[in-house]
Image: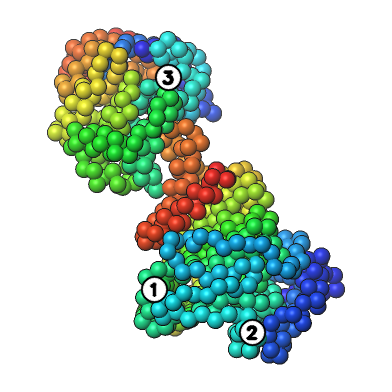
Amino acid sequence: MLEIINLHAKIAGTDTEIIRGLNLTVNAGEVAAIMGPNGSGKSTLSYIIAGRDDYEVTEGDILYNGESILEMDPAERATAGIFLAFQYPMEIPGVATMEFLKVAMNEQRKARGEEPLKVPEFLKRVKEAAASLSMDMNMLKRPLNVGFSGGEKKRAEILQMKLLQPKLCVLDETDSGLDIDALKIVADGVNALRSPDRAVLVITHYQRLLDYIVPDKVHVLYRGQVIKSGDKSLALDLEKNGYAGVIGEAA
Amino acid sequence: MNMHAQMHTAAEKALLDAYDQRMADLPGDSAVAVKRDNAIEMLKAGLPTKRIEAWHYTDLRRLLTSVPDFEPAGNAKALDPLIEGSAVLAILNGQTTGHLNNVEGVTVERVFEKLQNGSLAPALEPDGNDDAIGALNTAFVSDGWHVTVADGTELTTPLELQDTQDGGQVHLGLPVHIGNSVKATIVERHAGKRPGLTSCVTNLVVGDDSEVLWLIVQEQPEAATHLAQFNAWIGKNARLTVFVMNSGGKLVRQEIRVITKGEGSDFQLRGINLLAGETHTDVTMVLDHAVPNTTSRELIRNIVTGRAHGVFQGRINVHQIAQKTDAKMACNTLLLSDDGEFSTKPELEIFADDVACGHGATVTEIDKNHLFYLMARGIDEKTARGLLVKAFLAEVIEELEVESVVEALESRLDAWFATHG
Ligand SMILES: Nc1ncnc2c1ncn2[C@@H]1O[C@H](COP(=O)(O)OP(=O)(O)OP(=O)(O)O)[C@@H](O)[C@H]1O
Ligand SMILES: [Mg+2]
């Protein structure tokens, strides 16, 4: 489903290369975890997949369902089914959350040639999704993410994911800032989306999340490259021994 | 004004010629005629240039390139009121038409008649030599509504003063007297079909303990010249909120001059300027905190597209006796084109020592991170930009809180975006 081939990317307008020859394959139906020390390029990779233009791909390719997405803008990628849950969701003053959800859902429907949702149907879906994440509907009356607590922002990201039903979900440290109950709720939300035609890329520092969202593969990112891949036991190994061993092996 | 009387511009000449031709037809008794003659002497000295401080960013002499003929009655039609259910006082093609259907506590008279009988003569007084709008209006003012709202009146529906025109020249006076303990929402609306030249001077007196929301909605045609002055005096413990929206005209100046006359009074200014094409729009405020314990807030938000140029001058004078004044002013501009421009000049003149005053101005572009976030949810770039621009403006409108007012203004925003978005 996702194939990243020898990807090199730098910060646009500079010579600072952050992704340095990265290879990664994620198959449909798979949950892949990406781990790696701070600053290794995990968030950068997620932004590049989503199409943020602060980064410039200088070499290599990203294939989604066999086709390159490098020429697509973020909106086109999103309507094609790619979703990024941000590590730091942005606060957007003045944009009402409900209005935003409605526009996003309907824009995606429009791109697929579907009719816009009727208001009662839209409200029903939002209420159901919010309830499943134990979110208060009153929060959604506020401007997008403005004044939301760290954990509320993360839940709001998952709410959007549930409503948009993407095919490739990239979750960037969705677990950080969540209390234990919220972690379970969010994990349930992700697990509910698991299906043979979907793939999930979970970026995390903690084994704990992977107890709830059990990964099929674990990849270690270091200095802009995947230096080791394995199954879920690799995450347990890292939890116990840290990154030093893995980095040493690769050097 | 200026001392370059020898060489008049085409526009200055047209105005002076118009006066010569129209003098005999303009309404008014001999006292009014004297005021008009004095005002014309000011205009003879020339329109203000950028060398006059108050006109620094709006060089009227250079920018006013042509003046339309006075035209016999045009073909303007009344509009639906801005806010549903409002009582409309219409001014069509520069002339008051119709009457007010029984709004309790409100009496209206025609400015035309009050000029004829001379009762408005004392009010026709330009404020010094740089008051070009006052002078122009004094010379030509022909009609308008004089409104009186009796003490204790609570208007359940808004009152709309609706000026619609169809080219030519329109010179209006809108004297409004609000008594004590009144609650009122008043809309001052300017729109037109064919572009013309409009001058309008509004004089609003707000009595003690009253609460007034005054909305100025200017949607003149693209090539119009609109020169307006809003003067207000606020009584004890009274509150005046003025909301100005400019979304039309080629050359626009809206002056707002407010004096807090009574202790405990509060003035709020909210403004939205939607600027497009090759237009010039100037909002100039002068606020005098003249007595102790008064408060004010000013928040202006601007959208600049095309080659438009916007100006906000905000001057707050805190008089020596005006202790405990609390005044804050902010002007934020979203620049959506490389060729657009917005000039801001905040000024605080503080002669009292125990006050809290501040101002801030920003000019920004659309936040790239916000745009990315919205697009990452599948919202195409144009729609995402539109959402962010509206969000920037919505904050000002939503502060007005009255649902019917917020809805009405948002629908005017939508109308503008539909043609300029
Ligand atoms: N726009 C940018 N400008 C400058 N430096 C950047 C930019 N984006 C990323 N970097 C740098 O690139 C490196 C990788 O950052 P990135 O955020 O991808 O790391 P990460 O693996 O997500 O780290 P963490 O685990 O702390 O979230 C860091 O050194 C970061 O400072
Ligand atoms: Mg990160």
Image quadrant in which you'd find residue A85: top left
Tell me, for residue B115, which label it has, or none.
2
- Label 2 to label 3: alpha-carbon separation: 78 Å
Relative to B368, is B135 above or below?
below
Q: Is B199 situated left or right of A174 in this image?
A: right
- Label 1 to label 3: alpha-carbon separation: 66 Å
Label 2 resides on the chain identified as B
Q: Nearer the viewer, residue B210 or A89?
A: B210
Tell me, for residue B213, which label it has, or none.
none
The residue depicted at 16 percent of the width and 29 percent of the height is A184
Label 1 resides on the chain identified as B
Queried on whether the Cβ of the residue with tag 2 lies below 8 angstroms from ligand 1, the answer reads: no
Total labels: the figure holds 3
Element carrying mark 2: helix
Kind of residue at badge 3: Ile
Which is more N-terminal, label 1 or label 2? 2
Tag in front: 1 or 3: 1
**Residue corresponding to mark 3:** A19
Kind of residue at badge 2: Leu
